[in-house]
Amino acid sequence: MSEPFPQVGDLVAVERLDVQALFTALQQRGFRVLGPTVRDGAVVYDELTSPTDLPIGWTDEQEGGVYRLTRRADEGMFCYASGPHSWKQFLHPAVLRLWRARRENGSTQFEAMEEPPRQAFIGVRSCDLHAIAIQDRIFTGGPYVDPFYRSRRERAFIVAVVCTQPGGTCFCVSMETGPRPTFGFDLALTEVLEPGRHYFVARVGTEQGAAVLGDVPHRPARQEEVEADERVVAAAAERMGRTMETAGIKELLYANLEHPRWDQVAQRCLTCGNCTMVCPTCFCFNVEEITDLTGTVVERVRRMDVCFTTEFTYTAGRSLRESARARYRQWLTHKVGTWIDQFGSSGCVGCGRCITWCPVGIDITEEVAAIRATSGEKEGRL
Ligand code: SF4
Ligand code: SF4
C-alpha cells in the first residue's frame, strides 16, 4: 500500500539515501537547487547537482575572527554552523542590473529584463529564516515594494534544517530566532544520526512542500523518531557559543551614545565592512548609472554598499561619519536599536557571522555587554 500523500503540518521520516529524490523532485519542477557545499576552506552556498555536493562529513570551528573546517567521524550532511554566505546573495544580489538601454537611430530602446530563476534553497537555518523575514518586511512590507526582491522571493522554495551543530559564535536562542525553524519554510528537516541509521524527520510547511515531498519516499514519523527530533533541537539550544541580553537594548544604546566603549572598539575596528557583508539582514545599496565608451548604451546597476566606508555618508563635500567610532556606533545602534523603531524588530538574528568574520574578532555580544555593564559612563565629548 502506498503512503498517504503528505499534508501541511505532517511529520514524516525520510531515509538519508532518499535525499537524492528530493533533489530530483525539485530539479524536475525547474528549480535551480542551491545549498551548502565546501569551497575554499569554508561551507558556502552554491548551485548543487546532487546530495554528494553537500558538506558530507564536515563541520566547523568558529570563534571571534576564527573559522576552520574539520572532519567529522560520521556522514552528517548539515552538521556545521553558518558560514560566510547567507541567502541574501540570491534574493538581494550584491550586484544587480536594474535596466539597460541602447540609443539606435535617434530613439532609446530598453532591453527586456530576464525573469529571475526559480530557486530552491536547501539547508536554511532558523536564524536565516528570520533574516529572510526581516528582508521581506524591508523590501515588500511597506507602501514601496521592491519588484526585484519580490520576484525572487515569490519564486523561492525553502527547505529549512534544524541547526544540529551551533557554532562558537551563535546566539540565536538569545534573539529568539532558533534553533528550530517555526515558519517560512516549505519543508523543514531534522537530521538524525544514530548508530546504524541516518535519517531525517521532515515537517511539511506548505502545499508546495507537500507536493514535493510526495515525490520522495517517506512514511509517518514514529514516536521514537519524533522524540529524536525533539532531542536534537534541545541539545542544539544548549550549545550556543554566545548569549546576548536583549532586554531594553534599544534604550540602553540610545542612553549611551557617548560611552567610552565606542572609542575602545574604534581602536580595533579596521572599518573593513566584513560584518555588514556577511550579515544576512544588512541590505544597504547604492545605484550607479554606467555608459559605454561610445555613449550609446547605458545601464543602471544596484550595488551592495556598507556603512563602514566614508563614502556612505558623503554629503555636501564631506563624510558625516569620518571616524571609526562614529561608523561602528552607527552600525551597532542601527542593528539592534534604531532598527526596532524603523522595522519593528531587531536587525540581528544571532547568526554570529559578524563575529567569526571580523578580522580582529570584534564581538557584537561583547560590545553590548560592556556597555550594559558600565551604562551611563560618558567621555564628555561629541
Ligand atoms: S549582526 Fe552579526 S550576529 Fe546579528 S544577524 Fe548580523 S551577522 Fe548575524
Ligand atoms: S567590526 Fe570588524 S568586520 Fe566590522 S568593520 Fe570593524 S573590523 Fe571590519
Image: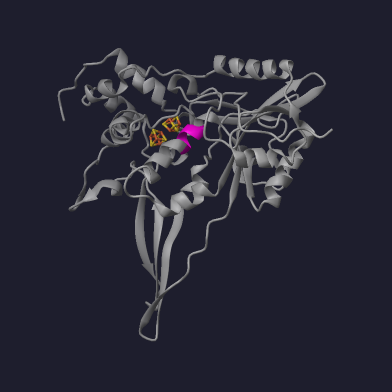
Quadrant placement of the N terminus: top right
In terms of image quarters, where does ligand 1 lie? top left
Q: Position of residue 261 (x, y in %)?
A: 29, 23
Q: Quadrant of the rendered structure where residue 81 is?
A: top right
Is 86 placed left or right of 327 in the picture? right
Q: Quadrant of the rendered structure where residue 299 is?
A: bottom left
Is 78 placed left or right of 63 in the picture? right
Q: Residue at x 61, y 15 (%)?
A: 235
Quadrant placement of the C terminus: top left
Which of these two is toward me, 276 or 23?
23
Q: Position of residue 216 (x, y in %)?
A: 75, 38
- On screen, 266 above or below 305? above
Tell me if residue 129 is in the magenta stretch. yes
- On screen, 25 above or below 134? below
Q: Residue at x 46, y 26 (%)?
A: 350
Magenta-drawn stretch, dominant element (helix, strand or loop): helix
Q: Position of residue 344 (x, y in %)?
A: 33, 31
Which of these two is toward me, 50 or 83?
50
Tell me if residue 184 is in the magenta stretch. no
Q: Position of residue 92 (x, y in %)?
A: 46, 48
Which of these two is toward me, 198 or 365?
198
**Which residue is situated farthest in the bottom direction here?**
105
Q: Is residue 48 visible?
A: yes
Q: Residue at x 52, y 63 (%)?
A: 114
- On screen, 301 above or below 80? below
Count of marks, rendered view: 0
Q: Residue at x 76, y 41 (%)?
A: 20
Q: Is residue 40 visible?
A: no
> Which segment is the magenta one?
128-132
Q: Quadrant of the rendered structure where residue 366 is?
A: top left
